[in-house]
Structure formats: C-alpha cells, structure tokens
Image: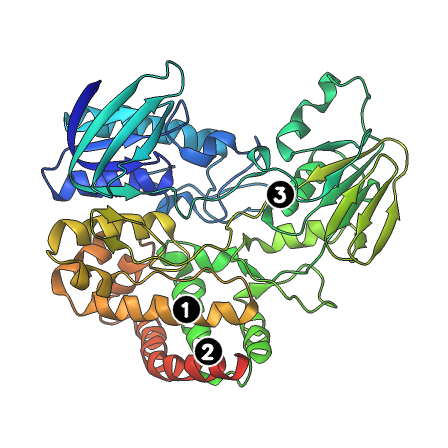
Amino acid sequence: MATLDTDYLIIGAGATGMAFADTLLSETDAHITLVDRHGKPGGHWNDAYPFVTLHQPSAFYGVNSMELGHRRKDTAGVNQGLYELASGAEINAYYDRVMQQRLLPSGRVGYHPMCDWQDAADGSAGGQLMSLLSGEATQVRVRRKVVDANYYGPRVPSTHTPRFAVGAGAWLLPPNALPHLAQNRDGRGLPKQFMILGAGKTAMDAAMWLLQSGARPESIRWVMPRDSWLVNRITTQPAIEFFNEAIGGMADQMEAFAQATTVDDLYLRLEACGFLLRIHPGRTPSMFHLATISPGEVQALRRIEDVIRLGRVTALAADHVVLEQGRVELAPGTLCIDCTASAVDLRPIQPVFQPHRIVPAIVRLPLPTFSAALIAWVEAHLDDDKSKNRLCVPVPFPHTLAGYVQAMMVSSMNQFQWSQDKVLRQWVRDSRLDGFGRLMTGIAPDDTAKLAIMGRLKAAAMPAMANMQKLMAASA
C-alpha cells in the first residue's frame, strides 16, 4: 500500500476546508493534505442549482488571501444598488483558482479529489484515503491533526432524499432541473403549473427563478410549512457608504436585544429597526435560519398569492399532495419542485479542538468561512486545546426563534474573547472575511455621526448580553 506523510489532513475541499487551509498555509510552515469526494474543489457548490447565488456580498466570502468578485454594485434587478452576489458558477471557478493559483503552487499542499477518507481504527491521527475511481488505498500518517471540515456541511436539494413518500407518476424535480425543462427529456412536455415544496431560501430562490423566467404568478403554488424571518441584505453591505445600515444596524440589533421583553418582542423590534423582513406581513414567522434577502425580492415573492399552509409534505402522488394537516389536489401537468432539503441539519455540538482532531464550526454568526479561517489562526498560534477552545466556542445554529438568542450570546462572547488578545484582535480587523472590522476602525476622528453610532453599539453591548440570558431563561 502506498503511504504519505502530512501535518494536517483536511476532510473536505469545500468552503470550510479551503478557508482553513488558506489561513494555515499563511500562518505556519505545515504540510496540508485535502481529500474530497468531488472531482473539483468547492464542496457543496459543485452540486448547487444553476441559479444559486450567495445570500450576502461576495466581498467577505471565500478564503482570506484571495478576493471573490470585484466589489461592484448591481445596477439592475432585485439586488440593485447593493454589492454583487457571486453565482454558483463564479464560486466554483473561484475555488478552482484558489487551489490552482494559491494552494498547490505553495508546494506544501496535496489535493486528492474523488477520494474517500477512513479514520484509523485505533483513534490516532491517521487513516486511509481511497480512490473512488480505482479503489486503491493510500495509508496516511498525520503528524498533527485531522480536520473534519464536513461535519457541519450543508445539504443541497440535488443530493438529498425526500423525507416523504413519492408515488408512481408523481412529477417531482430538484431546482437543478428547472433551467433544463425545455429539453423535455422525460417526455412530459412543459409544466402547466408549478408547486414549490418548502419554505427556506432554496424555495425562495426557486420562486424568484420562475418569476424572472416568465412564469405567471398565478401558475405558482407554494407549500409553506412555516413563515420565516429574513435578514435585510442592506445591513450586510461591507462599504463605508452603508455604514449607517451595517454598523448602525448592529447597534439597532444590540439595542433590541437589550430592550426586548420576550423573544416575540425581540423579533418585532428587529423588524421595526429594519434588520429583519418577512414576506407576508399578516403572518407571524416561526422560523429564522439567517436567510438573507433584499426588499426587492420580498416584493417580488409577494406576487405569489397561492400559499398553502397545511404543514410539511408527507406524501406525493400523481394527482395530489398529502400534508400534515390536509390534502391538496394537483392539476394535470403540475411540476412539484423539491426544496425540502435542510441546509443545516441538527447535529450534536462538538468541541472544535480535540485530541488528534479539529472540527471547524461557526464561531461568529453567520460567517462559516471567517470562522474556519479564525480557527486555523488559533491552531497556528496557541499551544493547548483548552486555550484554543476558550476562543472558539461553537455557535449553535438557531433551529428555533429562541435559538437565535443563544446563538448571538455565544457569538458575542467569542467576539469579546478575541478582543482581549491584541494579536488576534488585529488579525480579525485585517481579515477581509470579517466584513465590518475595517469599517469600525477606520472612522475619522471628526466624524461625529459615525462615532455616535459606535457609541450606541458599545453602550448596548453589556445590557444586551445580560438580557439575552433573561430571554433564554424565559423561553426555556
């Protein structure tokens, strides 16, 4: 059996694995090996539907050393006036460029696509990588740690199996198939109606694609088990011209956390200050998964009036769909679009730093690539796992409305810990993946308006943290 030696073995060459590898390469002299089941770097972006884009600006996504996009603002469409959102194709090309122009030329990175990984049976930092094409195995000796960059990996529609029964003759496709409908490969012809199954960002993307591609709003039905709170994209813009919306939005958010009397009151305050949006004002959302959207998209999605709120799909037949609270008939020629994949499944929280292993997690909401890069920096500069874990407490993904309070509390506590380390604090401020560090530290001494916003943010921080604990206790 062939063998190879490496310092770090990273499972997964997706967004998390690439961000970790990039920072580790900058901060150490370590040898790094990436192994991935895909044929190209980029992880789940290889499987994404063709019309997918980032939720938030390209400017703070990807790896720390290489810019994604051109910091241009969109001049047309529902994102007009806001900074560009990279498409799935652009992201795939970007990660290929990172691999070919940054990681591999270093001479300290090995990349093994179309391979699986099997941990050593004795629990040591080592194992085997196996080619999915030839079946050949390579024994890997890992001198430092295995990095499991897939543990919190997202699911996407094209690779998941529906959790409901699909009967004979049912017409069900993932969003990936929508741009290819005109090819009529299945002999059904073009759909006469559409039914979107699911209420998350994928469902919103599918609805937007249908509307923008010419589907009449009245031809679209939307099975929406739960309404969702949505982040207003204007609060995520990484440029000084949006200081009031971005940093002012952070101050508004902290003040809402400090003043809220209940979790429900918190969300209403966050909506009132413009941080959150909802598609249907008359409905009280019961879900918040951090999906980010523009006001223009909200207006467009409101054109779809046939919204079915009878719970989740339990079975799909050729002429009807069964839901938790009822049954809905399907007109002939109705295409059902499966948007029910859960992007982030509920998984047990693990410590980031373990003996022989690192499990990257989100340590600052909602930035997975920044989190992976920061974890790599901590691995490079600290010696013991206890100290590393003190700086990198995993932020639990909010699966309930109250879960957002806990997530923000952990994220804020991490941020405070980083601020106490001068070197780490400076790295965060210089990181392009941080998004807002440079906005907050580059204020002119005579810019009283921006300094006042910073004063509001600082004044609200401690009261917000104290009230977060009260809100969590009251909702337990």
Q: Do the residues under discs 1 and 2 have CB atoms within 8 angstroms?
A: yes
Q: Nearer the viewer, residue 112 or 104?
A: 112
Q: Is residue 5 left or right of residue 436?
A: left
**Is residue 65 visible to the viewer in this orientation of the structure?**
no
- The residue carrying mark 3 is 205
SS at circle 1:
helix
- The residue carrying mark 1 is 408
Q: Is residue 396 left or right of residue 141?
A: right
- Marks counted in the figure total 3
- Identify which residue is drawn at 65% across, 54% down: 298
SS at circle 2:
helix
Three-letter residue code for mark 1:
Met
Q: CA distance from mark 1 to mark 2?
A: 9 Å
- Tell me the quarter of the image containing the N terminus: top left
> Which image quarter: residue 214?
top right
- Identify which residue is drawn at 23% across, 61% down: 389
